[in-house]
């Protein structure tokens, strides 16, 4: 691992624009299991029944029973050393942005400023019908007797600003991530299996343009055969070590 980290740090320091793409693996140490993993929420809930726009209209109580559990899991989580490492790299001018598939807002909590959320976040809420914004503090205090949460304006169902199955990725996130993929000559992929589109296309786009792709992942992924360097370790272990190597030999700011 040390040799891979040293090589990755040297390539990172020589890059001009570095970008990170993160998935569920970066937050596992925060107590948020991958929804698809054993014990994850999708082993106990049918996503087609609780995480689609149609489900909100047909059985909102079930949707909100799922959301209460997801809220509690996310609410207990705190940023890991991996989140803090990425935030420090950005603050030092060595990381242009984080593109994340996670909905836990932990990158922002750690201090990252330029975070592009492919699937939205649990920290914001709006009415599914009229789109009116609602206070996230109320979501923190909802109990089983308070669901479904209904809109004060129109009576529609209030939901978090997350992308449910079958819904499009926010256009702003697609545009910004596409621009970053065109600019990046170094892409760090952390804790994602590479199974979910369109985020899984970004490493291939960067590499096709001659950029370097470095993966941090202790398990198998869609990138293990194509990554220029693969660091087989948990994100919370490898990223602080990589950060130290990059910043100890920092050169000109990256992506600024």
Image (tube, helix red, strand yellow):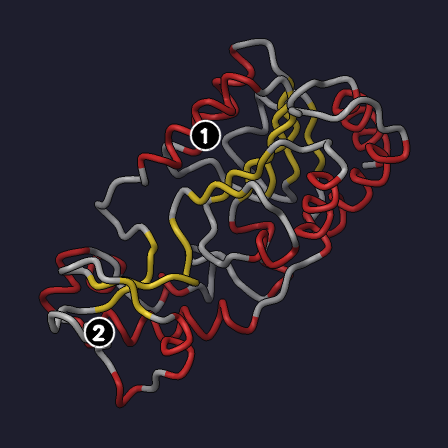
Quarter placement of the C terminus = top right
- Is 227 on the left or on the right of 45, as rendered? right
Depth-wise, is mark 2 or mark 1 nearer the camera?
1
Q: Observer-nearest residue: 12 or 231? A: 12
| Residue beneath disc 1 | 177
Residue 120 screen position, x and y as percent? 39, 50
Please, is residue 227 above or below residue 92 in the view?
Answer: above
Which quadrant of the structure image shows residue 210?
A: top right
On residue 36, the disc is none
Reading the chain from its start, which is encountered first: label 2 or label 1? 2
**Total labels drawn:** 2
On residue 62, the disc is 2
Q: Secondary structure at mark 1?
A: helix
Residue in the image at 46% along x and 66% along y: 39
View extreme (right): residue? 248
Residue in the image at 74% along x and 43% along y: 239
Which quadrant of the structure image shows residue 214?
A: top right
Residue 200 screen position, x and y as percent? 44, 31
- Is 41 on the left or on the right of 215, as rendered? left
Residue 27 screen position, x and y as percent? 58, 56
Quarter placement of the N terminus = top right
Residue 207 screen position, x and y as percent? 56, 15
Q: Observer-nearest residue: 12 or 141? A: 141
Please, is residue 32 above or below residue 251 in the view?
Answer: below
């Amino acid at each position: 691992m040390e040799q891979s980290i040293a090589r990755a740090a040297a390539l990172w320091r020589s890059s001009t624009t570095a970008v990170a793409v993160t998935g569920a693996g970066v937050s596992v140490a925060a107590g948020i299991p991958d929804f698809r993993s054993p014990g994850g929420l999708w082993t106990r809930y049918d996503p087609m029944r609780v995480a689609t726009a149609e489900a909100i209209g047909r059985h909102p109580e079930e949707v909100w029973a799922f959301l209460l559990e997801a809220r509690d899991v996310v609410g207990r989580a705190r940023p890991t050393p991996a989140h803090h490492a990425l935030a420090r790299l950005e603050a030092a001018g060595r990381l242009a942005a984080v593109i994340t598939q996670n909905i836990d807002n932990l990158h922002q909590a750690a201090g990252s400023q330029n975070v592009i959320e492919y699937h939205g976040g649990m920290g914001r809420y709006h009415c599914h019908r009229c789109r009116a914004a609602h206070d996230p503090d109320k979501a923190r205090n909802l109990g089983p007797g308070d669901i479904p949460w209904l809109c004060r304006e129109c009576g529609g169902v209030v939901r978090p600003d997350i992308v449910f199955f079958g819904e499009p990725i926010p256009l702003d996130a697609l545009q910004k991530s596409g621009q970053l993929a065109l600019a990046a000559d170094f892409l760090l992929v952390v804790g994602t299996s590479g199974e979910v589109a369109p985020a899984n296309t970004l490493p291939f786009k960067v590499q096709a343009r001659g950029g370097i792709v470095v993966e941090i992942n202790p398990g198998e992924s869609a990138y293990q055969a194509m990554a220029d360097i693969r660091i087989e370790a948990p994100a919370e272990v490898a990223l602080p070590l990589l950060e130290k190597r990059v910043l100890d030999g920092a050169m000109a700011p990256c992506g600024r």
